[in-house]
Amino acid sequence: MDNHLMSLSFSMEANKGVYALLLGSGISRSANIPTGWEIVEELCRRIMKVEKANHNDPIEWYQEQYKEEPTYDKVIEKLAYTPATRLGLLAEFFEPKQDDEENTKIPTKAHRSIAKLVKGGYIRVIVTTNFDRLMEQALEELNIDFQTLHDVSNIEGIKPLVHANCTIIKVHGDYKDVRFKNVGHELETYHDDLSNLLQRVFDEYGIITSGWSAEWDTALRNTIQSVKGRRYSWYWHAFTEKLSDPAEELIKIRDGIKIIDSNGADSFFSTLAENVESISKLKKTNHENIQVKINKLKKYITNNLEIELREMITEETQNLVQFTKSFTLPDNHTTEDKKEHIEIIKEKARTLAVLLSILTYYSKIETHESIICETLQRLTTAKSTTGTDFYRCCSKLPAVIGLYSTGIAATMKKNYKLLNKLFTEIRIRTHINRPENFLEFTGSFGSIHITFNGLYEKENHIHPFEKMFVHPYMSEIYNTSKLTFDEQELDEYYDTFELLLSLKHRYSGINLFPIGLFANKFDISHIQQFLKLGSEESESWPVLELFGNSIENFRNSLEKLNEYRVKRSHFDIQGLLAYYPIAIKS
């Protein structure tokens, strides 16, 4: 299977509603639906026959005979004089006949596969140049609610795209409306309202194009070219390696990813829908397996079954490390391939991350802590000392996941002795000469920072690694582990852990971790309360375990963190020192 198709499948499953479709006449080819131009050509041929004329080119004959372009509405008026007869004339091009044994002019496998993706919430916007109603029929077969826009006059009354279950935008119209567009000058420009709507779609969604040559639709090409954003990737399903020149130009402009499937749209969309469904089922199965392992882990902890516990954690660790060490990107890899690999790492690490969080929280004896530290040490085996920043980043992610999974749980349990072990006692399993401690290894600056900033856009000065990876992933992990009541509770412990992590970096003189998500929040009352409690408990505050049991060391670390904030004025953590008054005593 095409690697890009597999990458798209994983990305679509993980990002519901992010991708929109751009469909051309090729999507309906296997249903024997002609293109708009082919219909006009056939109608001109019939007029020529009525006029008892002969010409090799019906279009050229029409132009010579009537001194005008053969537009859809003008041509049909010459053959049918009433709306009813016009509709009847067109029906043969778009609607199946009762005695049609070949079942043509009905939704194809591609239409029905797309409908399944819509039903699953993966596709919510479909832009099409087609006049037929096969897409609508496929959606109706599955009882899917949708809205259709086939003329600019419809735009004002439609639901916002984000609130609609599915929206079909028929940029050239509908075959039952004689206003539909089919000739050169009609395709050169769009009404401003339609153009603005399409620009939003092409800017805000990833696009999957199929069956569209891009050769004749000037306005659509220009609209695509006018969009400068690169929020999500563009995929172009191609029947052959070489597309039309306009299509190749658009792919170049949009940094598009070409997916070759010579078997056509039916094969492409069927495979895509099957892939997405399989990935979704696999995730569900994994979730069920995780629940079984959680129950076993709790039994092992309760009954002090060290052998069984150690074997379970070791097996999960081996699977994750082996996968990370064996991974390679295809030679012609794309940004989406890299994003997809990161998603796979998350899935491979999920079970271990959940188990480690639970083991850390319910840890009762020294053996449990030993297994936790031993596991984090083993996760550093995956380190890549060669290759690109991306490879080095990916080799570190298992250890980072391990640190956050255990660190948040230790913070929840106020087990600062264990948290200090996680920060200071993990040995890096590396063969390089210069020793590297665990805080350096898991620091989000360096290859991790470079990789995520290259893959994702920075938003409000928040590092993409925090926003797009570690925070949402920990939300999933702690939701599965059932250790936190809700998102708010998790965020309080998450922020406290990151505060301690950033302070420990300053105390250790490493500074490979910035500050944390809390620095970009308006409400940090939970952090202020945490520091206030520390001030009240003075020397007896257990957190000082992380700083050599010294208020002075904690004070210096907090001041260094504040200095870091001052140098980067977009961070606003004003008030932290004020809530730990001991820290500012002379």
Image: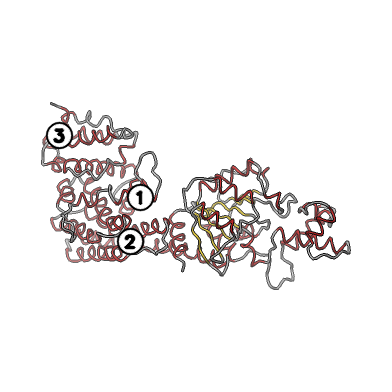
Q: Which mark is residue 372?
A: none
Name the residue tied to disc 2.
348
Q: How many numbered badges does the structure rendering display?
A: 3
**Mark 1 or mark 3, which has the lower sequence index?**
1
- Does residue 97 appear left or right of residue 2 in this picture? right
Q: Amino acid at mark 3?
A: Glu
Q: Secondary structure at mark 2?
A: helix
Q: Position of residue 163 (x, y in %)?
A: 54, 45
Nearer the observer, disc 1 or disc 3?
A: 1
Name the residue tied to disc 3.
537
Nearer the observer, disc 2 or disc 1?
A: 1
- Tell me the colour scheme of the image: secondary structure
Q: Amino acid at mark 1?
A: Phe
Q: Is residue 430 above or below residue 190?
A: below
- Does residue 135 appear left or right of residue 78 in this picture? left
Q: Amino acid at mark 2?
A: Lys
Q: Which mark is residue 452?
A: 1
Q: Position of residue 464 (x, y in %)?
A: 36, 46
Q: Is residue 49 above or below residue 126?
A: below
**In this view, which residue lies farthest toward the top?**
586
